[in-house]
């Protein structure tokens, strides 16, 4: 997959901003972009997805416990589901 034009802007944003939100229409590569940031070593983070019913249930039933069990840096895919 080729480097997206937003990659540089995202790299700059995560360097100095605590929370970043990547939004856009369905199927445009938001999750893939995040995966590439991790795989290419541009962002050291844990990635979780709310598409996983176990993770979703944990976040819904115990939001604070869910957050406490995450790494310092995390990408939450499909966060709107919670």
Image (spheres, rainbow, N blue to C red):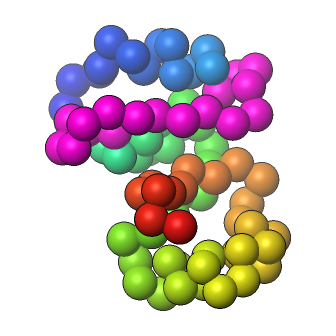
Q: Is residue 4 left or right of residue 68?
A: left
Residue at 62 percent across and 76 percent down: it is 59
Quadrant of the image for the N terminus?
Answer: top left
- Tell me if residue 7 is in the magenta stretch: no
Q: Position of residue 76 (x, y in %)?
A: 53, 55
Quarter where residue 2 is shown: top left
Residue 5 vs 2, above or below: the answer is above
Q: Residue 44: in sight, yes or no?
A: yes
Q: Residue 40: in sight, yes or no?
A: no
Quarter where residue 42 is shown: top right
> Overall secondary structure of the magenta stretch?
loop
Residue at 65 percent across and 86 percent down: it is 61
Q: Is residue 70 left or right of residue 64?
A: left
Q: Using the image as rendered, state which of residue 48 and residue 27 is in the foreground.
A: 27
Q: Position of residue 16 (x, y in %)?
A: 75, 20
The stretch of residues the image draws in magenta is 14-30
Q: Is residue 7 left or right of residue 3?
A: right
Quarter where residue 29 is shown: top left
Residue at 70 percent across and 49 percent down: it is 73
Q: Position of residue 79 (x, y in %)?
A: 50, 57
Residue at 52 percent across and 79 percent down: it is 55
Q: Using the image as rendered, state which of residue 53 and residue 10 is in the foreground.
A: 53
Q: Using the image as rendered, state which of residue 42 and residue 18 is in the foreground.
A: 18
Q: Position of residue 11 (x, y in %)?
A: 56, 21
């Amino acid at each position: 997959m080729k480097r997206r034009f937003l990659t540089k802007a995202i790299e700059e944003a995560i360097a100095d901003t605590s929370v970043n939100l990547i939004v856009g229409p369905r199927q445009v590569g938001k999750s893939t972009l995040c995966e590439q940031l991790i795989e290419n070593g541009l962002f050291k983070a844990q990635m979780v997805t709310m598409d996983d019913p176990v993770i979703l249930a944990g976040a819904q039933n115990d939001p604070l416990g869910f957050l406490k069990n995450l790494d310092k840096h995390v990408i939450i895919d499909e966060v709107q589901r919670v």
